[in-house]
Image (cartoon, rainbow, N blue to C red):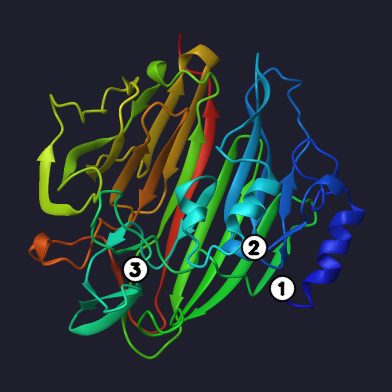
Amino acid sequence: MSIVNRPILLTALMAGIALAQYMSLPAFSQPTQINGQPIVVLKRAATSNGAKPEFLSATILPGRGMNLLQITANIPGKGEIEILATPSLDEVARQLSGDAFGNKSFSTFGGAFLVPYANRIRGTQSADGQSITTSWNGKQLTLPANWSGKTPGAEKHSIHGLILTRKADDFKVSPDGTSITATIHGGNFDGHWLSSTDLVIRIDLGSNSVESTITAKNVGSESEPIGIGWHPYFTIPSGRRDQVRLHIPATEHVETNNLDDVFPTGKLTEVKGTKNDFTAPRGKLIGNSLYDDSFASLVRTHGEVIVDLIDPPSHYGLHIEGLSPEIKTIQFYAPKDKPFVALEEQYNFGDPFSSEWKGMDTGMVTLKPGQSTTWRVRLQLFTPAS
């Protein structure tokens, strides 16, 4: 964090904006920093006296790629709940300590932002198994091999971008404590990417919405591909996943080789009449099975991709609204029998540089020098019809 932020943080503390207040526990019992930067908590006062759903707080880790770690909200009849599946800050700090690639940021909790690509990228593995090599427009990319399936001998590959361990170069909290804006000068992401990229990440907390915006700008001298996504783990307030309903406005499903590697085959299949059809307006029961599925050919409502997560026992509904036209896929991940699901609005398909796609547009945006692209997703609470 640059020196210029210190008076901002002190002002925020003096104003009672809870930059050192975490969850419902006393500030002294919780870590105040992760990866050398303060944990920031945006807060707003409740205004409905518990009568309607409203967001209350958002916890962000500037030291970990601006990970949107937790969101809280009031739900009538349930009181204050956590929107994202995240352990205590002590446990988060413990798990992230020594996490060289940032895998814990997306594999177990919170809401990691994924730049300059979401999902998996395959390639030729290095002799030491630490990296893979692929290419884009004839130019070579060498990426960390930070993931593999659980099957013995599963192929190592790169997953979920290059900012998971990055610190924000600077960040500012708004005077009212409900908004934060950060800059990450990504450069060429430690030699793993082409050209040079600046990122501006903003998170806004309101009573009716939490909105995240990421703008990537090519500040280098050559063209580059950019994909942006998010990996939020949404809780199920009732804990009854078997009763949860999901609406995904997608007419096609991305075929993969299996649910361990989850490598796309390059084939899209219609969802109508299949187990992957979640297009019903009031959603479809998801049960307790394992999902790790990508959906495409997204149907927009007033230009937005609106995914609905509905927990009838809790009278709880959440809209996940993709506001950027570049969003082309929805990844739905749900471990078997767990009380949470991940719903990821992403620019790009999995393994976007693969020849399996046979020249199809796989969602990576090409930025020429000076060009930028903006990913924007909004969360809104609602009470589902009984």
Q: Residue at x 35, y 83 (%)?
A: 194
Q: CA distance from mark 1 to mark 3?
A: 28 Å
Q: Residues within 10 Å of mark 2 (few under 14, many from 20)?
A: many
Residue where numbered disc 3 is placed: 145
- Of marks 1 and 2, which one's residue comes earlier in the chain? 1
Mark 1 is on which residue type? Met
Whether residue 304 is situated above or below residue 174 in the rendered picture: above
Q: Residue at x 36, y 27 (%)?
A: 246
The nearer-to-camera label among 1 and 3 is 3
- Of marks 2 and 3, which one's residue comes earlier in the chain? 2
Image marks 1 and 2: residues in contact by CB distance under 8 Å: yes
Q: Residues within 10 Å of mark 1 (few under 14, many from 20)?
A: some
- In front: 299, or 92? 92
Image marks 2 and 3: residues in contact by CB distance under 8 Å: no
Residue where numbered disc 2 is placed: 62
Mark 3 is on which residue type? Ala
- Left or right, 137 with respect to 332, comes to left
- At mark 2, the secondary structure is helix
Locate residue 184: give its quadrant: bottom right
Q: Residue at x 85, y 41 (%)?
A: 26
Q: Residue at x 44, y 52 (%)?
A: 230
Q: Please state the horizontal and vertical placement of residue 366, each as a whole percent of the image.
A: 29, 73
Mark 2 is on which residue type? Pro
- Left or right, 168 with respect to 363, comes to right
Q: Residues within 10 Å of mark 3 (few under 14, many from 20)?
A: many
Query: Given the current orientation, which residue lies at the most extreme front position?
Result: 152
Query: Given the current orientation, which residue lies at the most extreme bottom position?
Result: 221
Q: Please state the horizontal and vertical placement of residue 142, each as a whole percent of the image.
A: 31, 79
Q: Please state the horizontal and vertical placement of residue 66, each as a whole percent of the image.
A: 59, 60
Residue where numbered disc 1 is placed: 1
Query: Given the current orientation, which residue lies at the most extreme left position?
Result: 358
Q: CA distance from mark 2 to mark 3?
A: 24 Å
